[in-house]
Image (spheres, rainbow, N blue to C red):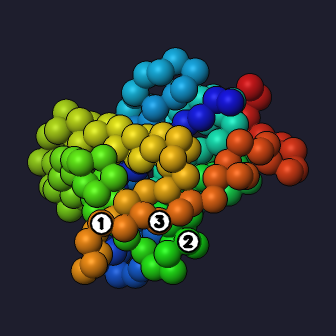
Amino acid sequence: MRLVTFDIETKNTFADVGGREPSMLDLSLVSIHDTETEEFSSYFEEDLSKLWPVLEKSDALIGFNSNHFDIPILNKYYPGDLTEFKSIDLLESIKNSLGRRIGLDAIAEATLGHRKSGHGLEAIEWWNNGELEKLREYCEQDVRVTKAVYDFIKENGYVKFRSNDGLRNIPIDVSDWDKPLDSTVTHTLPF
């Protein structure tokens, strides 16, 4: 399977746009890892036409809170409908098992022993200050962490988190992760 792990950063916050709907936000950057090439790459808005063929040829998109945040934002720029693609949202899987949401940083620290390199508000500052290399490095690091968490779950069937009682395992059902999408997606791009 060709898997694309991805993360996006935005140019603005919910306070800036006066609402809580992710599609109101503007994309600054999307970073990916493609299992076909085993490479990380990043795309600013003007580069998105180079990203679409990669997504169109993928078997699944992997992200953290991607179904409710990243995909609705990225979908504003895509000429088709990314919600029709197979998506593995790690946060959604965690919430389905645990009954509540836990941040990527907390999951990564407990499961992998390391944290993310920053947070989304810093990414907006870097965008506003023109520090695009810092922005790219941060977003690609988030993709590395997300991919590592995905790989851990696939191999072990759980992730870890710290609760008041200490370190706990959250079982994750991965049985449908390798299954192809039930319906054929008609992509709008000619690839």
Mark 1 → mark 3, Cα distance in angstroms: 10 Å
Residue sitting at 48 percent across and 40 percent down? 151
Residue sitting at 51 percent across and 80 percent down? 99
Quadrant (top left/top right/bottom left/bottom right) for the C terminus: top right
Residue 113 as seen in the image, left or right of residue 8: left
Mark 2 → mark 1, Cα distance in angstroms: 16 Å
Q: Are marks 1 and 3 in contact (CB under 8 Å)?
A: no
Q: Are marks 2 and 3 in contact (CB under 8 Å)?
A: yes
Residue 151 as seen in the image, left or right of residue 82: left
> In the rendered view, would you say 142 is above or below 54?
below
Q: Which mark is residue 97?
A: 2
Give the labeled residue for mark 3.
170
Occupied quadrant, residue 102: bottom left
> In the rendered view, would you say 138 is above or below 121?
above
Give the labeled residue for mark 1.
167
Observer-nearest residue: 100 or 58? Answer: 100
Three-letter residue code for mark 2? Ser
Q: Residues within 10 Å of mark 3 (few under 14, many from 20)?
A: some
Which element carries disc 1, helix, strand or loop? strand
Of the image marks 2 and 3, the number of the one nearer the N terminus: 2
> In the rendered view, would you say 163 is above or below 4?
below
Total numbered badges shown on the rendered structure: 3
